[in-house]
Image: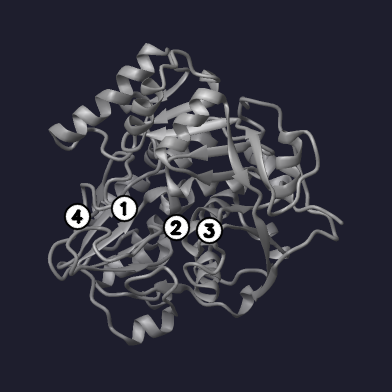
Amino acid sequence: MGQTITEKIFSAHVGRDVKAGEIIRSNIDMVIGNDITTPISIKAFEDSGKENLANPDGFAIVMDHFIPAKDIASANQAKISRDFAYKHNLKHYFDEKDMGIEHALLPEKGLVVPGDVIIGADSHTCTHGALGAFSTGMGSTDISFALITGGNWFKVPEAIKVVFSGKPSELIYGKDLILEVIRQLGVDGALYKTLEFTGDTIGYLGMDDRFSLCNMAIEAGAKNGIIAVDDITRDFLKDKKLARSSREFYSDSDAVYVQTIHIDVTKLEPVIAYPSLPSNGKPLSQAVSDDIAVDQVFIGSCTNGRLEDLRIAAKILKDKKVARKTRLIITPATQKISLQAQKEGLVEIFISAGAVFSNPTCGACLGGYMGILGKDEVCISTTNRNFIGRMGDRSSKIYLANSAVAAASAVSGKITDPRDL
């Protein structure tokens, strides 16, 4: 009986063939922490009496949620991670000098490699499956165990195969594909399972779309999302100094899946997730007919703050203005993306249109800072969650969409089909 990609990755790390449902102990290639979750891991590490990290070059701390610090509490929180990084002379410590949202920054730096086992104390660590790696979120104390031992325990997940077919039509992006998957499965339909994304559609998706696709696997309850390596993956990696040797794994033709979902993307229109669940997906045409006014538009996050998202938004915003009663916040995912956006003239387009263009940060996505919603305010956002109170006041409402729909909505002041501008 064959194996899935995820089973093969774990088999390579364990040194024997493993199957879904097994409890295994695997070594870990990269552990990721951020300024919110790492201090808890640090405390557990230091309470253990351990003095040295098991694999210091396999630990990255990315200061991305409240950096630059928004208040005294966040400054003191960040100081814990900063002091620990300096104490252990961490090679992969990223703060204001080279900042970015962790799930965009680490692939950019070549720290995520096909065939890896990766964990992070952030639920959207599943993003890195776009590079053919097993990547999942864990709790902060699980992270500390990995820092102490170099490994951790896993239950090898069963797999759901998602087969996308057809060339995506205009305005259909990775965000729409994953919102459709979540709409079909629900927020717990893939609980503790792998979402393995396949089909000829994948060949039409660049890496930015693939990262978006895997990023939101957790919103269906999945343990990880994963896409097999192909020439598009290799092209993304070719100019990077990879932290480890790449290992490409592919599912066998007789691999076992607990479910297979077929989605003809040629029949899709952009998907809008209505409040207050990512699974509450509706076609864009319904959102347009519902005439939903928006107070704020946010383009950014680890889901859709990449360069292609900014290019899409700039194409729509060029020579236009943000609606008088609407705010537009655009946040690049990394400094490199920010610099490239400036070189291409995108930032000038944004600011001329009336947008705020910020430093890289998770801030607004989690209702942290730089974009908090007030009472009864409505936001259309390219982020990954629209739970009650996610971006601010509990009475506020969040609609999730791709970058094109978000940008068009900023111009009209209501949820809009970009083709209608």
Residue 162 position by quadrant = bottom right
Query: First in sequence: mark 2 or mark 3?
Result: 3
Labelled disc at residue 365: 1
Contact check, label 1 and label 4, Cβ < 8 Å: no
Q: Nearer the viewer, mark 2 or mark 3?
A: 3
Residue at 38% of width from left, 28% of height from top?
Answer: 44
- Location of residue 168 with respect to 315 vertically, above or below: below
Report how many numbered discs are placed on residues in the image: 4
In the image, residue 3 lies at what x, y percent?
A: 80, 52
Question: How many residues crowd mark 4 within 10 Å: few (<14), some (14–19), many (20+)?
Answer: many
Does dot 3 land on a helix, a strand or a loop? helix
Query: First in sequence: mark 1 or mark 4?
Result: 1
Residue linked to disc 4: 372
Q: Calculate the distance from the C-alpha at mark 1 to the C-alpha at mark 4.
A: 9 Å
In the image, residue 246 lies at what x, y percent?
A: 71, 33
Contact check, label 3 and label 4, Cβ < 8 Å: no
Amino acid type, mark 4: Ile
